[in-house]
Amino acid sequence: MANFLAQFLSIKNSCERVVIAVEDVSDLWPLVKKGFEERVPFKRATLNNKTRNPVFVDNLSAEFILTTDARLRSRFPQEQLLFSFREPYATVVLVTCEDLDEFKTILKPRLKLIVQNDEREWFIVFVSRAPPHNDQATKMAKKVYAKLEVDFSSKKRERCCKLDINGPEASFWEELESKITECVRNTLDRRIQFYEEEIRKLSEQRFKPVWSFCNFFILKESLAFMFEMAHLHEDSLREYDELELCYLETVNIVGKQKDFGGMEHGDDQAALLIPEKKPLTQIVQDDSFREFEFRQYLFACQAKLLFKLNRPFEVAARGYSFVISFSKALALHESILPFCLREVWIITSCLSLANATAAHYSNGLVAPDIEKEYYRVRGELYSLCRAKFMRLAYLLGYGSAIEKSPVNSASLSMLPWPKPAVWPSVPSDVSSEVLAKEKMILQATSRVKHFGIQRKPLPLEPNFLLREANRRRASLSVGNVSEIFDGRYMDGSVSHAAMSRTNSTPGNFESSIDRPMKLAEIFVAAEHALKKTISDPDLLASFSSLDEFERKYLELSKSAAENYHNSWWKRHGVVLDGEIAAVCFKHGNYDLAAKSYEKVCALYSGEGWQDLLADVLPNLAECQKILDDQAGYLSSCVRLLSLDKGLFLSKERQAFQSEVVRLAHGEMEHPVPLDVSSLITFSGNSGPPLELCDGDPGILSVILWSGFPDDITLESLSLTLTATSNADEGVKVIRSSGATILSPGRNTITLSLPPQKTGSYVLGVLTGQIGHLRIRSHGFARGDPAESDDLISYERPTRPILKVHKPRALVDLAAAVSSALLMNEPQWLGIIVKPIDYSLKGAVLHIDTGPGLKIEESQAIEMEIHKNTPKKPDGSNDKNNASVVETQLTLKDGSIELPDWASNITSVLWVPVRAINDELARGTSAGTVSPERPSVVDGLRTVALKLEFGVSHNQTFERTIAVHFTNPFHVSTRVADKCSDGTLLLQVILHSQVKACLIIYDAWLDLQNGFVHTGQTDGRPTSAFFPLVVPSVSKAGILFSISLKTAITEDEAKMMKPDSILNIRYKIKGNRNLGSHTPMSVGTNGFEDDATQLLTFRSAIVLQQPVLEPCFAVGFLPLPSGGLRVGQLFTMKWRVERLKYLEENNQDEVHYEVNANSEHWMIAGRKQGQVPLSIKQGSRIEISILCVPLAAGYVRPPQLELPNIGEANISCNPAGPHLVCVFPPPLSSSFCIPA
């Protein structure tokens, strides 16, 4: 079967479409040929794939060929079976007949003979040529076609169709296409089954010695080609995949390994996309094929099918995998292949794959993830091509032009040298070329980095080329051994002495033994060997000069970077941008170089690759300096300083700082803020945050870490505070007062903090100025500052540095005593000063007394610690209650400065004051039904306090406290007894109004006119009653015997005494912590007696004479019988009757007043007025007034008074009630619903 290989290839190249045979029985083909050929390719066809599943095929190509054509002439049976894919897939029989007898006798037997082959798919097309106007001919044609259908069609399958040339034909073409598709499908199914059976038989014999891969290949590819003709590309691709796997299994069988191939000229150019580059007959070897050509042929067939399937991304992915795997096969046979054929083949294969897939690829037609993967694979192809290209360039002496970057070093240092069996020798007559290479080596110098940075260059070779090349020479050199193992680099480090050294041959050795080659000679030998290997003129031109090499190198780098940028691996693209930037920098294109370097630095910085960043960042800084980009140059210097200290020497870091300082203090055209977040970081002190209250200033301590190698001066420094709870507050800026010098490492600075609003604050941004340069830092230190002096982090701290509490009571001022103090006597006023979790250090208290109260400035002010333990009411000293700290203070202009010991504890300030009341106290007269005590309001005095405290006295607290002053006694009187002789026993009741013990030593009563003492002249009770002790809040009584005075002398009439005066001399024993107490000694002013130290109290008492001569009688008339209710109007009446004529009141009118509590009663009418009353005895009048009760309960009713008539002349008969009952208002029923 292997003999048919050439014929198979010839048939395959000439057969591209499905063949439809045309059996022209009635010579109709010229008439219908045009119509038939216009219908191909078939727009929509349904075929079965290898697994018998229907597949819709678009644009199925087909070709109509007459059975009489030479291309369909009879062949040998074996040939027909082997190449059945080229045989017709359907047979169209064209017939026509206008006579029924002719059909039966001539046409029918002939058709039976044609269709008797069961393996051939056929159908009959009856062509009617009857004119439309000839009914007889039309009817005859119908009869013949009907007979034709009866004879050749069946219920299972219709095999006839009719074409009316002179009639409508739209439905015919659809029927024709359907029948052709059916025939093709059936034929395809049978042929697939045949090929599968034959392939199965050969597969079973695969491991037998008689098995031939060529036979298997012809069957397998015939089946794949048949699928391809039928547009079943997926099945065809699957066949080629299986063919490749089978080949790889057989080619690696021990004992069957044949010639590898690749030795012919032009084999260096990959044929991955050109199946027909070499005929299979040229690469056949015994019963198989050479691996080098055949594997490329298989991949080319697969790629062609994938392109037809519109899957160029799969071509790229498969191609990259194929290049990697095939390069390993090339490495195994590298010793027999031309010099560097492996590297050249990889370059050409990667470029051809990248270009072909780009030509067939359309953006946006696939899913985004597939598109990104496609670009990644293309980037890998260009990157692999670039690495191999640099390896070949290094062999030619262009290594000095390759940037010794980390990515280039990683690619080339792990890429082995070519491994030929013998390293190429130096051709003759190339001394000029060797000299030129030596000159190039000497002139090559490595570029000195900016700032004088010195780094050991990264290697671009796995081992020394000089040693590797000489080791692979045909014979061992006997020259200078050190020359073989010399570690010289290609960057110009070769000494002039070594280049001019004479290589002598020691004695006793023949001259045929080669001396070691010099590096220049190795370059020249490799260049001449590559010229023999490389057949691609474009690739060869890329190595013709250094400029051409850099152009091609830049092109490959840009292509790889561009594809990486469009893929998942964007970082690879950024890294290659750095290589592009190096070439741009070398050629003076600093602008493009700077842009590319910025991308690379951003990537390295984001990934934290500081070693790589330290290699690239100086290049960026140099570009920015050349471009006069001051802002960018400063930023690069700061970033260099921010890197790990071990990456640069101390003098290099100092050089970075000197550049920053030089530009900062120089003339900057456009000063811009410089971000130093990575160089200067800051944090708050360890421990709890500073706590202040709303409105408080303070001192904020902040720790700064400086990454500068030397001290640096900041002319100004400020920090922002950001509120964590309220975003509307914005940021608060705090500034330092002067210049700040930062030392390397940790620094602690303090900033004055103005008052802030309530909230929690964290550090925001640090800003400052170095010369004319404004700096800005967002860097925050992490963790405890004590961990490291160089600890830097970019995480924003969550722990607040400042907490400003809500406005609250920071201090409380209150009166120490709630009970009353003595009126008109010097008393200690206690003021409690209570700090509430706030220091009162340096606080000043301003005291302003209200009217009726003054401070005794002659007495010192006392201050002591407040004790909550109550002391005894009798004022006895308790040593356990004594104050621990007591201080005497002086009042200056109404202000007192509090001592430091009282800044954090509750203390009591004792201020000597005196309440002044010039009015004489009045007691309650005898006979009053409901005695009323003096109003508390009369004894109230106010003290306005203002406390200034906090830093700079920014906090103030104002409060006005009320202090109650009172007399020691309230006096009330009653007549205890009335003797028969007119003597009255007057009982004076003394009610103690203070929380202290009162001791009465003397008391006397100065009577008013109309009363006299009986039995004594001075009005004093028995002395045995004194001293009389009156405990706190208790009563005591004193009896006086008095009588009415019948006659008043003229002298007494002139000295009228309307009131009686009660005089009491007493002492008081009390505690100032509880209330009234013994007045402090203030001299002899006032009522104080220096001899006895007794106090004097005086009270006026009004003694009413009995109603002996009543002139008027006022009677209270009864209230309504139904009772009083709130809100109901009623009339209250009084009757006034004249009992006798009164000379001093001889008017016929009486003035009246109605007094009522406005909270209990509403009066409708005149509350006072004049009413006529005759002067005759017994005359009467009623006074009525409308009232409305306002409150329910027992309340005092309104009272009628006659102000112009003395109480001694008015008799109440009947007397009015003291209290009346007022019922609540009736329930409202306006919203009630009856049941």
Image (spheres, rainbow, N blue to C red):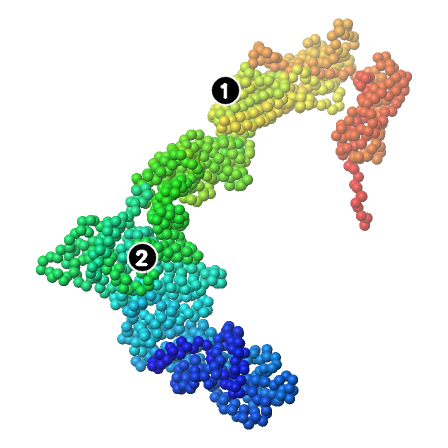
Give the Cα separation between the discs numbered 1 and 2.
Answer: 96 Å
Mark 1 neighbour density, 10 Å: few (under 14) some (14–19) many (20 or more): few
Q: Is residue 1069 left or right of residue 351?
A: right
Q: Is residue 214 left or right of residue 952?
A: left
Q: Is residue 1136 left or right of residue 648?
A: right
Residue visible at 42% across and 64% down?
357
- Between circles 1 and 2, the one closer to the viewer is 2
Residue visible at 50% across and 75% down?
41
The residue beneath circle 1 is 888
Find residue 1115 and report its horizontal and vertical position in percent.
Answer: 84, 24
Q: What number of labels is visible?
A: 2
Which residue is at the front of the view, 247 or 138? Answer: 138
Residue visible at 50% across and 38% down?
731
In the structure shown, which secondary structural element does the residue marked by tag 2 occupy?
helix
Find residue 51 and report its horizontal and vertical position in percent.
Answer: 46, 76
The residue beneath circle 2 is 390
Question: Split into 4 quadrants, where in the image is the N terminus?
Answer: bottom left
Is 531 rendered above or below residue 999?
Answer: below
Is 1048 rendered above or below residue 885?
Answer: above
Res 537 quadrant in image = bottom left
Q: Is residue 688 visible?
A: no
Find residue 265 and report its horizontal and vertical position in percent.
Answer: 29, 68
Which residue is at the front of the view, 265 or 1096? Answer: 265
Res 1091 quadrant in image = top right
Find residue 725 and report its horizontal and vertical position in percent.
Answer: 53, 41
Q: Is residue 37 visible?
A: yes
Kind of residue indicated by mark 2? Met
Mark 1 vs 2, N-terminal side:
2
Residue visible at 33% across and 39% down?
655
Kind of residue indicated by mark 1? Gln
Mark 2 neighbour density, 10 Å: few (under 14) some (14–19) many (20 or more): many
Q: Which mark is residue 1189?
A: none
